[in-house]
């Protein structure tokens, strides 16, 4: 192809040469003819006689004309051909580029402009002007070319080109990006302007055929993703977030792009949940974009709520999304989520109550249990099981439970009901009774339920409920002292008063005393006689025998007994001494002061039996010191009044 093109150029050059030669020859002949006509006319006018013959004259004239023509031809050849610079030879003066008919946006095209002075004269200046085609940009060029951005031309100026001198320049252009498919890249002819002194010449070089742009948008990464915002399985009223991703990874601007997401009839989006100006209409969320440039990405999101209606368990919720370009569907994706509808028995409740009524639940009494199973879910509970382990403090009362589906299970030490067919919104009640175990007669405790329901793979824990078992209070009360205890019955009277005042409680009231015993003797036997009884209440009644003997021993002994009693957890009370009218005991009030000091030290209460007995010593004391029957009653009542302040309503210690 290139050889044919060069041959055609060579032919054209020859034709041009002979045409110009003919024109110059005719011009010389015309000038010569005019000259001879004028000469002959002058000869005739002057009547010059020539002796030569006519024939000889014609020969001479003809020779002269031929010489003139040859001279003219030589003149023309020398000045217009031989010595003229020449860039006409297309074999050496041409534009070369890769024969790429089809190009992509962003492609690079390299052009090489060759030149050679084929004439016999040097060229002072050669200017090569290259116009950069539309939809391209100059990427690089060799040499000292100057690029004019305003007219998009690249110009080279080359000086002193001798005959047969040649050279080339190269430049690279880049196809614009993006470009529409079918855009033409048409290079203009390369312009040669060359100068020899005052003379100027022009030459245009054909830059060859143009290029056709091949381009298209590419949406191969088009995708859709869905996620249940609520997490877990998709159920009624749950929201799904849909994310659609579209990116033009091609090399052409995509115009009039539409994304259409077709929702399941069970899904309802809100306009506030649709981004990128998308609109919802007739079950479709639609986005329209006038243009999507290469590399541009759109992330489209919206939320939709599963609103039920005729939706069924395990139904597939499909969202189909299509990509429409130039009015045609070019891609289609879908995402799906599986609906799971379950019975919901989580609102089920349990109650337990004392079947006997009253303020307290005692051992042996009956506890009524009621379980209300509620289905607040999305579908019927076909098969479900109620598990009711029996709490430790109670025993199931045989045959008291709801008969439907009931079974005893040793594994859970309780009852299991196998049930079925609980519709949405319905409730079912299960009842049974339990008895408080006898070992809780003196022991308090709490009955707490641990019931649960299993439906399919789901377990519903019923909120635990509790009821308190009140154990009967049992207190050991010890009165420790001398003959004021051993020779009277006020301790037994105290027991009767406690039992009468607190019928729910049992009291083991004991007297630990010896006639004539002094406080230091009581201290000596405390660990062997009183300590092992582990009394909850200890009443210390010493001093009658101590008075008049040893104040310091008395105070030390009382102090130590109180400390020992508190160490075993007893609530300690100390009776005051007196009144005493027996000879040698007149300093008894001093010993009461010691009692008050020890009581204050340990923060224990003092029982003032002295004052009520002093109201009538003759009535209450038999010998000025020991209690009469009436005196024992006064002491028992006084002690009861003090102790009761430290007991609760049932008679147990506070």
Image: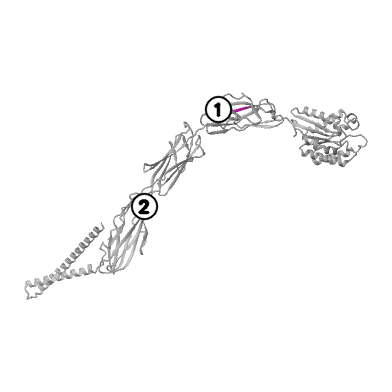
* Label 1 element class: strand
Q: Quadrant of the N terminus?
A: bottom left
User: Residue 182, position in %: x, y?
Assistant: 33, 49
Q: Is 595 covered by the magenta stretch?
A: no
* Residue drawn at the location 35% of the way across and 49% of the way down: 215
Q: Earlier in the sequence, mark 1 or mark 2?
A: 2
User: Magenta segment, principal secondary structure?
Assistant: strand
* Image quadrant where residue 121 sits: bottom left
Please state the horizontal and vertical placement of residue 600, each as a whole percent of the image.
Answer: 81, 40
Q: Position of residue 81 (x, y in %)?
A: 22, 67
Q: Which mark is residue 235?
A: none
User: Hey, which residue is sitting farthest right in the picture?
Assistant: 583
The quadrant of the image that shows the C terminus is top right
| Residue topped by disc 1 | 418
In the image, 301 versus 498, the foreground residue is 498
Q: Is residue 424 visible?
A: no
Chosen colour scheme: one colour
Height in image: 128 above or below 351?
below
> Residue 126, located in which quarter of the rendered image?
bottom left
Lateral position of residue 77 relative to residue 534, left or right: left
Q: Is residue 635 visible?
A: yes
Secondary structure at badge 2 equals loop
Instruction: From the image, tell me which residue sits under label 2.
Output: 105
Camera-side mark, 1 or 2 = 1
Give the magenta range: 369-373
- Local packing at callout 1 (Cα closer than 10 Å; few below 14, some 14-19, many 20+) is some
């Amino acid at each position: 192809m290139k050889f044919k093109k060069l041959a055609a150029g060579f032919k054209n050059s020859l034709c041009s040469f002979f045409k110009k030669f003919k024109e110059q020859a005719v011009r010389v002949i015309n000038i010569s003819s005019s000259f001879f006509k004028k000469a002959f006319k002058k000869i005739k006018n002057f009547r010059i006689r020539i002796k030569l013959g006519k024939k000889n004259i014609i020969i001479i004239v003809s020779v002269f004309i031929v010489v003139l023509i040859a001279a003219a031809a030589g003149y023309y050849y020398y000045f217009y051909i031989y010595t003229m610079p020449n860039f006409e030879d297309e074999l050496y003066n041409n534009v070369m580029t890769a024969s790429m008919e089809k190009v992509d946006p962003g492609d690079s095209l390299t052009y090489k402009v060759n030149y050679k002075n084929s004439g016999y004269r040097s060229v002072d200046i050669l200017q090569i002007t290259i116009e950069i085609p539309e939809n391209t940009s100059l990427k690089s060029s060799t040499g000292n070319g100057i690029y004019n951005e305003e007219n998009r031309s690249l110009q080279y100026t080359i000086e002193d080109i001798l005959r047969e001198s040649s050279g080339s320049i190269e430049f690279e252009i880049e196809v614009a990006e993006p470009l529409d498919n079918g855009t033409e890249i048409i290079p203009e002819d390369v312009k040669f302007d060359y100068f020899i002194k005052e003379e100027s010449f022009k030459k245009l070089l054909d830059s060859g055929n143009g290029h056709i742009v091949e381009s298209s948008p590419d949406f191969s990464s088009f995708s859709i993703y869905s996620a249940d915002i609520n997490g877990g399985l998709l159920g009624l009223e749950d929201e799904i977030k849909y994310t659609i991703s579209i990116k033009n990874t091609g090399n052409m601007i995509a115009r009039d792009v539409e994304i259409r997401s077709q929702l399941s009839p069970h899904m309802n989006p809100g306009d506030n949940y649709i981004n990128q100006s998308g609109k919802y209409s007739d079950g479709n969320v639609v986005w329209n974009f006038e243009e999507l440039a290469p590399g541009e990405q759109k992330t489209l999101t919206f939320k939709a709520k599963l609103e039920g209606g005729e939706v069924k368990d395990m139904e597939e919720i499909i969202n189909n999304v299509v990509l429409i370009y130039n009015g045609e569907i070019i891609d289609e994706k879908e995402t799906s989520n599986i609906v799971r509808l379950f019975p919901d028995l989580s609102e089920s409740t349990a109650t337990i109550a004392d079947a006997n009524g009253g303020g307290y639940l005692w051992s042996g009494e009956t506890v009524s249990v009621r379980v209300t199973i509620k289905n607040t879910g999305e579908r019927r509970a076909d098969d479900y099981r109620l598990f009711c382990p029996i709490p430790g403090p109670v025993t199931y009362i045989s045959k008291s439970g709801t008969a439907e589906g009931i079974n005893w299970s040793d594994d859970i030490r309780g009852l299991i009901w196998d049930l079925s067919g609980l519709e949405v919104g319905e409730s079912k009640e299960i009842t049974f009774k339990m008895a408080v175990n006898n070992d809780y007669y003196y022991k308090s405790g709490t009955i707490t339920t641990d019931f649960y329901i299993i439906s399919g793979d789901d377990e519903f824990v019923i909120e635990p409920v509790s009821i308190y078992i009140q154990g009967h209070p049992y207190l050991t009360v010890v009165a420790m002292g001398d003959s004021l205890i051993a020779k009277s019955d006020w301790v037994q009277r105290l027991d009767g008063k406690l039992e009468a005042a607190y019928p729910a409680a049992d009291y083991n009231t004991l007297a630990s005393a010896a006639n004539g015993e002094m406080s230091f003797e009581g201290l000596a036997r405390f660990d062997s006689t009183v300590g092992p009884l582990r009394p909850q209440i200890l009443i210390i009644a010493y001093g009658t025998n101590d008075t008049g003997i040893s104040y310091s021993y008395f105070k030390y002994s009382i102090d130590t007994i109180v400390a020992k009693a508190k160490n075993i957890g007893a609530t300690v009370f100390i009776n005051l001494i007196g009144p005493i009218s027996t000879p040698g005991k007149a300093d008894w009030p001093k010993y009461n002061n010691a009692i008050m000091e020890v009581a204050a030290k340990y923060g224990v209460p003092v029982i003032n039996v002295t004052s009520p007995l002093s109201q009538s010593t003759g009535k209450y004391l038999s010998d000025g010191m020991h209690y009469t029957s009436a005196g024992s009653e006064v002491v028992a009542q006084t002690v009861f009044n003090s102790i009761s302040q430290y007991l609760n309503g049932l008679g147990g210690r506070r």
